[in-house]
């Protein structure tokens, strides 16, 4: 028995040193006093939390951050579902290729892809040059919410599509045939059979994309520029620019806590909706 | 209820011809099985009847109505699949109600009809369960109830018993037959199991490589197969090669192990090179039938109700004989065999290979 536990010792050690210890340290930091001109004092206080929770500015940014993540999740769902459907229903021979194409963008780093969008969406990018050539006004696609959302949707699409495609592939074609035989049109068959049966994948994909989007940092910085502010950016600013480790840590903790509560409620609802799949 | 007529049905997948100019008439209220080895086109034929595949050529009629171009939901069919294909996210009640619900049947009527059919298939009281909470047999009966509750014109069954264990499978054969008679519904039943086809079918359609080999009642197929392939596929057969001739109005076949009188078959069509088809139970030890031959017992196996012998009558001619276990013959023993002319049938030798 203990031998088996021994096998996971390296990974436990790895996570303890690189994840748990920094986390615990951050929790501790969020309760320490920040005197002007010094990093912190080893004195317990709740002031940092009070500052974060009382400041309307933080709440507004928090609301924005969650809203961007919800928007990204919704858009990846709307765009990713048909994509997942096409992949799941493709002939067996062609499916591996399609899956590879879906995953291929993940082989390129996020930063590089963000610069790719720059070439397309920038003030002198492909889109605006095209508009200019057609005699139209250029549009602002970069360094705002639009640019950031385009980037986020692009980066997280594979996660959504993969998770839905997996669920769709688990649906036996005979189940859909049975619905048709019973008098359901293709449209009705989709909404009453295929869609509910794909919900496990939809819910998993939404969870994944939301978590990734709400905590994303690089894309908002590169594509949102100075016109977009999200909590992860704010935390980094507090920690590195303002050098205020205690308040930065407290903000991170509040953000973490609220997101966790949100996800807990989500998982509860999800389990209720998927009662039929629980064995 | 409606009869089903298939006219010159053809379906290709790439270069493979899955169904080849299949014409067939299934009478109102009849249960017909499509029988054949895997890849013979039986499931494709069923799917074409159901509207799940579109034929490359030919027509499908339900009664006088041409349904070839109609999608499944407008054909008025009930179908049961090998894996049952129940809706896993719906309870038994909701599964069975599905067809009525999409047809817009009023709620109170749905409840009554669902309850009635669940009682009929002995699932009363299980309506609130999800499919994964049911045994294989219960899932099977739910699928039958779901297909039958809409009173379809035609019932299609695609190897519905293949996933059940042997004992339950045997029970369900009779149960399905009973249910089908009670509803009087025209039924197409796909199977690769010839015993199942024998028990269930009014008539059997034997398919091979998409081509109809023979169509007939089970005993007709067993006693009067049209080819060596059909004789071999349905039940056990012994084949003895020979030359046919007519003697005194009887079809006689001269073979290496004797000259035998037969009841007819291919020889009647004028073929000269024929195979005599002898079922294992047609051969008797001793006996006073006019057709006689001798051999040596090589092997014997106990089947419970029968003893299964392999008897070498000539080099390369080993006959299988199944006989009453009350009289035993030992391996190595020399035995005399006889059979009646009525139990001997002939098929053309040409395509025997």
Image (cartoon, rainbow, N blue to C red):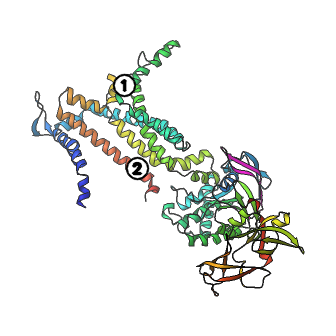
| A7 versus B244 height, above or below | above
Residue A17: percent from the left, percent from the top? Answer: 19, 43
Say whether marks 1 and 2 touch (CB < 8 Å): no
Residue B132: percent from the left, percent from the top? Answer: 49, 61
Residue A232: percent from the left, percent from the top? Answer: 28, 33
Check the picture and name the quadrant holding the N terminus of chain B.
bottom right
Quarter of the image for residue B62 reads bottom right
**Residue A269 marker:** 2
Quarter of the image for residue A26 reads top left
The chain identifier of the residue carrying mark 2 reads A
**Residue A223 marker:** 1
Most prominent secondary structure in the magenta stretch?
A: strand
Q: Which residue sits at x=25%, y=39%?
A: A254
Q: Is residue A266 left or right of residue B196?
A: left
Q: Circle 1 sits in a helix, a strand or a loop, which is it?
A: helix
Q: Is residue A236 left or right of residue B79?
A: left
Residue B134: percent from the left, percent from the top? Answer: 51, 65
Which of label 1 and label 2 is nearer to you? 1
Of callouts 1 and 2, which one flags the residue occurring earlier in the amino acid sequence? 1
Q: Which residue sits at x=74%, y=85%?
A: B287
Q: Which residue sits at x=63%, y=63%?
A: B113
The chain identifier of the residue carrying mark 1 reads A
| B161 versus A52 height, above or below | below
Q: Is residue A161 left or right of residue A191?
A: left
Residue at mark 1 to residue at mark 2: CA–CA distance: 33 Å
Residue situated in front as seen by the camera: A233 or A102: A102
């Amino acid at each position: 028995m203990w031998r088996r536990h021994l096998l996971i010792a390296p990974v436990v050690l790895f996570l303890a040193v690189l994840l748990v210890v920094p986390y615990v340290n951050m929790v501790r930091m969020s309760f320490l006093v920040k005197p002007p001109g010094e990093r912190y004092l080893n004195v317990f206080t709740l002031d940092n939390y009070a500052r974060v929770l009382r400041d309307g500015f933080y709440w507004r940014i928090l609301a924005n951050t969650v809203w961007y993540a919800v928007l990204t999740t919704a858009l990846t769902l709307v765009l990713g579902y048909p994509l997942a459907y096409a992949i799941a229903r493709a002939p067996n021979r062609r499916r591996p290729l399609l899956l590879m194409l879906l995953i291929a963008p993940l082989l390129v780093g996020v930063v590089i892809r963000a610069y790719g969008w720059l070439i397309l969406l920038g003030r002198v990018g492909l889109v605006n040059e095209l508009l200019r050539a057609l005699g139209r006004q250029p549009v602002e696609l970069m360094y705002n919410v639009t640019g950031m959302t385009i980037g986020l949707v692009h980066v997280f699409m594979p996660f959504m599509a993969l998770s839905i495609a997996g669920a769709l592939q688990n649906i036996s074609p005979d189940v859909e045939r049975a619905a048709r035989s019973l008098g359901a049109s293709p449209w009705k068959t989709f909404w009453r059979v295929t869609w509910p049966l794909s919900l496990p994948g939809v819910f998993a994909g939404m969870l994944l994309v939301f978590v990734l989007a709400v905590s994303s940092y690089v894309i908002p910085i590169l594509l949102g520029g100075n016109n977009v502010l999200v909590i992860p950016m704010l935390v980094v600013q507090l920690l590195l620019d303002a050098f205020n480790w205690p308040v930065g840590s407290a903000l991170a903790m509040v953000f973490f806590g609220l997101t966790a509560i949100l996800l807990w409620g989500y998982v509860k609802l999800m389990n209720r909706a998927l009662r039929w799949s629980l064995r | 209820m409606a009869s089903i007529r298939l006219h010159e049905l053809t379906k290709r997948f790439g270069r493979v011809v899955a169904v080849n100019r299949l014409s067939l008439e299934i009478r109102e209220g009849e249960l017909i099985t499509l029988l054949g080895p895997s890849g013979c086109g039986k499931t494709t034929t069923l799917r074409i009847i159901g509207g799940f595949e579109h034929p490359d050529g030919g027509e499908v009629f339900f009664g006088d109505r041409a349904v070839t171009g109609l999608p499944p939901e407008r054909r008025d069919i009930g179908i049961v699949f090998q894996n049952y294909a129940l809706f896993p996210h719906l309870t038994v009640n909701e599964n069975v109600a599905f067809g009525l619900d999409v047809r817009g049947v009023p709620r109170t009527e749905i409840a009554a009809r669902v309850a009635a059919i669940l009682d009929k298939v002995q699932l009363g009281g299980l309506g609130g369960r999800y499919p994964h909470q049911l045994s294989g047999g219960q899932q099977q009966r739910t699928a039958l109830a779901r297909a039958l509750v809409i009173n379809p014109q035609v019932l299609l069954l695609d190897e519905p018993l293949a996933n059940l264990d042997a004992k339950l499978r045997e029970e369900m054969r009779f149960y399905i037959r009973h249910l089908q008679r009670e509803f009087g519904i025209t039924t197409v039943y796909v199977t690769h199991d010839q015993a199942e086809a024998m028990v269930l079918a009014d008539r059997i359609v034997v398919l091979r490589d998409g081509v109809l080999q023979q169509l007939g009642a089970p005993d007709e197929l067993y006693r009067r197969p049209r080819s060596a392939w059909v004789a071999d596929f349905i039940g056990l057969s012994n084949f003895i090669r020979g030359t046919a001739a007519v003697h005194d109005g009887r079809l006689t076949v001269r073979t290496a192990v004797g000259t035998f009188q037969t009841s007819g078959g291919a020889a009647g069509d004028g073929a000269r090179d024929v195979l005599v088809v002898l079922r294992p139970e047609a051969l008797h030890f001793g006996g006073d039938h006019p057709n006689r031959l001798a051999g040596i017992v090589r092997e014997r196996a106990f089947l419970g109700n029968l003893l299964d012998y392999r008897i070498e009558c000539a080099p390369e001619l080993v006959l299988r004989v199944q006989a009453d276990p009350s009289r035993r013959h030992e391996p190595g023993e020399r035995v005399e065999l006889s059979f009646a002319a009525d139990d001997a049938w002939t098929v053309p030798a040409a395509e025997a290979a």
